[in-house]
Amino acid sequence: MARVGWKDFIVWQCSIRQRNFRLHKGKPSEGLICNLYEKKTNQEVKQFISVLLEKKVEDSSRMFEFMYKRTHDPEDRYLKAVKLFSDEYFNQPDKFDGRFTATFSKDDPYLKILNSKKSFQAQFFERETGFDFPLKVQKLAKTKNEWKFTFWHNFLFNPSLNENVEIFLFSPDKSGLKSIA
C-alpha cells in the first residue's frame, strides 16, 4: 500500500459522489460503501453507505431541513436534492475534511460492536482505486449538528426514514491513510 495525501481521498470521494448524482440520480456506487473491519483481527465488521461531512455542517443541515419541509412531494424533494448534489455541492473538496457518518436501525445487531472500544479500519474501493485508514467511531446524540446533517440529508432520499435510528460518526486518523489497488 502506497502513502498518499488525505486530500486525494477527499477529492476522490467528491468526484465519485458527484458522478453518481449526475449519471445515476444519486444511486450509491461501490466507492461510497465503507468496509469496516477490526484492526486487531482484520475481520470485517460491517459494510455501509457513508455520508461525507462538510467541515462546517450547520448551514447545510438547515438547508437540507428546509428542502425537506418546503414540499410534501417526495419526488420533488428528491429531484431538487439530485440537482444540488450533481451541480455545485461536491465541486469544492476543500469544504470537506474526510469525516463521514452512517445511519443504522436501532435494532442493528452490529451497534454493540460499533459502540465498543475496539480499534477499526475503514476501506473504500471502486474500480482501480481504493483507500484504507484507521478511524474512531462515535455514536452521535440527536442534538449534534452531524446527526442533524446526516438525518436531513438521508431524509431527502428516503421519505420513510424516521428519527428512530442511530447515527455514527467516523473520524479518520489521517496519518494512517494508505492507497490500495
Image: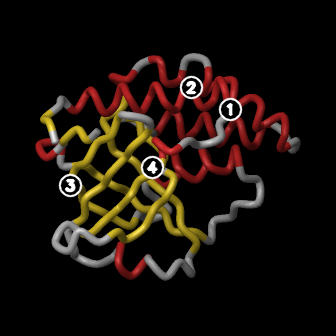
* Crowding near the residue tagged with mark 3, few <14, some 14–19, many ≥20 C-alpha atoms within 10 Å: many
Nearest the eye: 109 or 158: 109
Is 41 positioned to the left or the right of 78 in the image? Answer: left
- Residue at image location 76% in from the left, 37% down from the top: 78
Per the image, label 3 sits on a secondary structure element best described as strand
Q: Which residue is mark 4?
A: 145
Please report whichever mark, 1 or 3, sits nearer to the chain's N-terminal start.
Answer: 1
Q: CA distance from mark 1 to mark 2?
A: 8 Å
Q: Nearer the viewer, mark 4 or mark 1?
A: 1
Please report whichever mark, 2 or 3, sits nearer to the chain's N-terminal start.
Answer: 2
* Crowding near the residue tagged with mark 1, few <14, some 14–19, many ≥20 C-alpha atoms within 10 Å: few
* Crowding near the residue tagged with mark 2, few <14, some 14–19, many ≥20 C-alpha atoms within 10 Å: many
Q: Amino acid at mark 1?
A: His
Residue 176's x, y, as percent?
14, 46
Cβ atoms at labels 4 and 1 below 8 Å apart: no
- Residue at image location 58% in from the left, 53% down from the top: 151
Q: Which residue is mark 3?
A: 134
Q: Amino acid at mark 4?
A: Asn
Cβ atoms at labels 1 and 2 below 8 Å apart: yes
Q: Which residue is mark 1?
A: 24
Q: Which residue is mark 2?
A: 19
Residue 171's x, y, as percent?
28, 51
Please report whichever mark, 1 or 2, sits nearer to the chain's N-terminal start.
Answer: 2
Please report whichever mark, 2 or 4, sits nearer to the chain's N-terminal start.
Answer: 2
Q: Amino acid at mark 3?
A: Pro
Cβ atoms at labels 3 and 4 below 8 Å apart: no
Q: Is residue 9 above or below residue 165?
A: above
Q: Nearer the viewer, mark 1 or mark 3?
A: 1
- Residue at image location 22% in from the left, 49% down from the top: 133
